[in-house]
Amino acid sequence: MKKILSILSSLAVAVTMNAQGAHDFKINEVHVHSSECCDSSSCSQAGYVDEYGQPASWIEIENTSYSTHDIRNCYLSINPAVLDENMPAPEREKLMSAIPAGDPRTSIGAKQRITFFADGNTNRGTLHLNFQLPVGKPFTIYLFDGNAVDLLDSVRVEVLPAGSSYSRLGGGEWQVCEADKVTPNAPNVAYYNDKIKEFKEKDPHGIAMTLMCMGVVFSCLILLFVFFHIFGWAMNRAAKLARVRAIRAIHEQAERVVEMAKQGTTETKGIDMETYAAVIGLALHEYFGGTHDLESGILTINQKQTTWADKSHELRVLPQHHQAN
Amino acid sequence: MMLLESVSTMDFIGTKLADFLTYTGFANVEWANIIMIAVGAFFIWLAIKKDFEPLLLIPIGLGIILGNIPFKAAGLEIGLYEDNSVLNIFYQGVRLGWYPPLVFLGIGAMTDFGALIANPKLMLIGAAAQFGIFGAYMIALAMGFEPNQAAGIAIIGGADGPTAIFLSSKLSPNLMGAIAVCAYSYMALVPVIQPGVMKLLTTKAQRQIKMKPARAVSQTEKMLFPVVGLLITTFIVPSGLPLLGMLFFGNLLKESTKTTRLAKTAGSALNDIVVMLLGLTVGCSTQASEFLTLATVKIFALGAFAFIIATASGVIFVHIMNIFLPKGQKINPLIGNAGVSAVPMAARISQNEGLKADPHNFLLMHAMGPNVAGVIGSAVAAGVLLGFLS
């Protein structure tokens, strides 16, 4: 049973881990290539070309996690029919472009990106999709997990100005980037929201940082203080109650035994002989030794004047009568 | 014919010897290397002769010497910064920040949080002393450092070597060598820096305050502390997870009473191995060209400020607490310095200063409370800085 449970839990962990990896893929930037783009002056910036030197539309996907994940076997599509929940996965796969396995380029490092060319030429390699992005009309891009069922991400792209791209910002919002801010295979320009720069500009003396950090440090330790203050009090109280209860039980037993002893009866009244003897012994011990309640743990030594070390004890009485003689 | 052969052999030997000489340290030495080797030797002297943190200063001192042995860059894979060299492999633990959490595992396995649990209000002193970090942060900004560099330098005020290495490796890796050496140097110099500040901020009567003995702490409380501590601190500051997670993990190994063997290993053999490698590689990373700069001088000055501010803020915070505490429950302000987390040196300073004021006043166990709270506080502070600036 234990083995089955451990296997099941391992499987659950493995499945969750896979899912976590895939869900970290986000569509990051989209560029629609058109002939207008190459005619414009911005062609040099926006004209990201494939391995064959051909400019094409592209979709950039980012691994937003801090660990490496492989995007192989995931699917990309712009066909809204893939959203039909009743469509079986094999049918849906036919409407999408699969990202092939076996190419090391599909393994994306932490916070890294991969760019796929939407040129409809899958024979050109792993990075080429089986569809083209429509020019001059809006569309939606869908990114599906390897099972062709789970939608990982999607983005609606309106008609873009020539040479521009549609980029995801840090907060999950999207914006149209002009040709000089198009960044295929690189972090989006809007992403350069540098924390250090922000602190340098808005908190040049470090006062805000100090207040925030000290606040957090104090919060953590105050919470710990409150918890252990209350818990310590409760533990003390519980220990005290337990001791008082034990002492009370001893007293009750002792009283019963003393009562029986006074009556001079040999009957044990429901108490077996061994317990009877033990309780008598304990009762006598408590009676003569004094029952100890709670100890403070403080040892107090009160100085008391005694004559035990008095020099006079060391002297013998002088034999005065001898002197008299 | 024989003569010609012997002449060419001699030429060959001469050429090779001359070539060999270009590889020696003598041919490549610079004044900066000599200075750094002298610094390394000074650290070893301090450790052996003055008994200043020998477990740290000996590996660091020898590391400084090792890292400053001059050699010709010929791709021999021997230098710390050369890929695949043995030292470079050891250095990955510093560069990628996995030595400090292992050291924290050892610290957790060796630390008894009993004093802190018995008197939880002492945790607040550990929090107050972290002001040393942020005081130094403000000064570092004023001196022209970037916020990430300032944070890396300021963490020296936490008086926690592994935390300083962890944070600086993430935020300001180019200053890490100087920050680490500075942090450990000042930790060794705690007995020199702190007593003066403590005396300055306390009267004799305050130094003679006797504190109530701490209550006995049950094993249940000790077992619960690492779990609750981990949950509270890491839920608030997840960026401190590597340090806090390992600290509390080590402590749970110790207090669970079921994993004594693991706790023993974590606190002894494993910790010793990591400390050796950490000290050696940190020392090695202080190559003269990187270390002998104006920035290093500034870092050392800031480190001293950070320690002084941390000590002062701990002591002053105890004064503030005493205003609100009833008579008979006052805290001796001499334990305020222990909030800086240099375990257990800072607590020992409290004890020594307490004994100087009153030979019957033993503050060690009381000072251990803020001392271990300081470890948690500095790890939390590092996590917050990392969260804000990385």
Image (cartoon, helix red, strand yellow):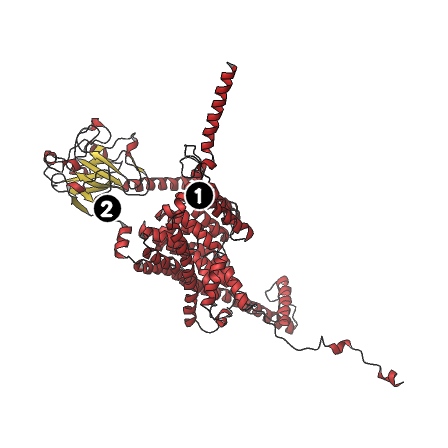
Chain name for mark 2: A
Provide residue A307's location: percent of width, then percent of height: 70, 78
Dot 2: element: helix
Tell me the residue that label 2 is attached to.
A191
Location of residue A112 (image quadrant): top left
Instruction: Tell me: residue B180, above or below residue A216.
Output: above
Identify which amino acid the numbered label 1 is placed on: Trp
Please tell me which residue is depicted at 81% across the width and 80% down the height of the picture: A317
Front in this rendered view, residue B94 or A16: B94
Q: Are marks 1 and 2 in contact (CB under 8 Å)?
A: no
Tell me the residue that label 1 is attached to.
B31
Identify which amino acid the numbered label 2 is placed on: Tyr
Residue A217 horizontal side relative to residue A316, left or right: left
Provide residue A9's location: percent of width, then percent of height: 38, 42
* Residue B98 visible, this orientation: yes
Camera-nearest label, 1 or 2: 1
Front in this rendered view, residue B121 or B161: B161
* Residue B228 visible, this orientation: no
